[in-house]
Image (cartoon, rainbow, N blue to C red):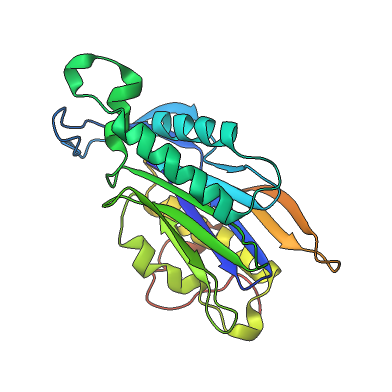
Amino acid sequence: MSLVMGVSVRDEFIILSGDTKITTGTYDRDNFEKSSKDIKETGLNHEKVFPITRQVLFSTAGNVHVGDIVKAELVKRISSDNTLEECAEVLQDVAKELWNKKQPWWHFNKDTLSMNFIGTIYFSCVMFGFLKNGRTGMAYIDPESVTVQIAESPMDQGLNCIIISPDQEDNTNYTNWFNLPNEEQTLGNYIQQFLLTHSKLSLKHSGSVSPDCHMYVLFKNKNGQVQYVKDVSDSSQLYDFLEDVDHTKLYKLYKS
């Protein structure tokens, strides 16, 4: 499975992070629903977050093979200057084309067979980036309609935030760790909160999520130009602190 987390704040910055663990699972060959809760570690690692243009970050979670195909098709059709809306439009075409290529299990073609995971909860694709109007936002494939939806970040209080993990309830329970007071919504504070949340969820899902947090940041410098930074941290250093912590209150890794 995977852990992918993203936040976009007003017209200021974006953070998108992911783990790297690859696991295997058993799925029903007819409806592609998970038929077994047994998750096996492969010992392999694979990055799940990538910069695809100067202004857009891309991530996939779930089926790694599908994610690689979607990313390859998307990158072939975009340019380095594309904004989030432009990438979302291309992603819509890619998702529909690949979804229409899906075949039943007896065709024994790994690529076309894997396309059945598009439109299920076992494959997610999310992008965070800057829009043409200068604001930040997120775009994602809606699994029910296989359409790409765009959510623009509000300029007042609030933000776009998503957590994709082995437990769908994490997106409800742990996004409150990103709902910082307006005056504390700084890039430095959010970087600390990403490390905190990744540590907690990788501890919670230790068989499915690796502790290494690969964090990507897009932000505007004082001249209004978008800059890119990547950081890799070992979040397991916080395990002792977080072992008895749950989602019921806002925990901070930074000082107010």
The location of residue 27, given as percent across then percent down, is 20, 32
Residue 85 seen by the camera:
yes
Residue 165 seen by the camera:
no
Which residue lies at the image location 31% right of the left edge and 23% below the top edge?
A: 112
Judged left or right of residue 68, residue 15 is right
Front position in the image: 165 or 116: 116
Which residue lies at the image location 63% right of the left edge and 65% below the top edge?
A: 192
The location of residue 25, given as percent across then percent down, is 27, 32
Judged left or right of residue 89, residue 98 is left
In the rendered image, the vertical position of residue 101 relative to residue 213, given as above or below:
above
Q: How many marks?
A: 0
Front position in the image: 243 or 16: 16
Judged left or right of residue 212, residue 204 is left
Front position in the image: 199 or 132: 132
In the rendered image, the vertical position of residue 229 relative to residue 27, given as above or below:
below
Which residue lies at the image location 39% right of the left edge and 46% below the top edge?
A: 124
Going by the picture, which residue comes out furthest to the right?
Answer: 223
Q: Quadrant of the C terminus?
A: bottom right
Judged left or right of residue 22, residue 228 is right
The location of residue 145, given as percent across then percent down, is 28, 51
Residue 30, picture quadrant: top left
Q: Quadrant of the N terminus?
A: top left
Which residue lies at the image location 36% right of the left edge and 51% below the top edge?
A: 147
Front position in the image: 80 or 27: 80
The location of residue 65, given as percent across then percent down, is 41, 28
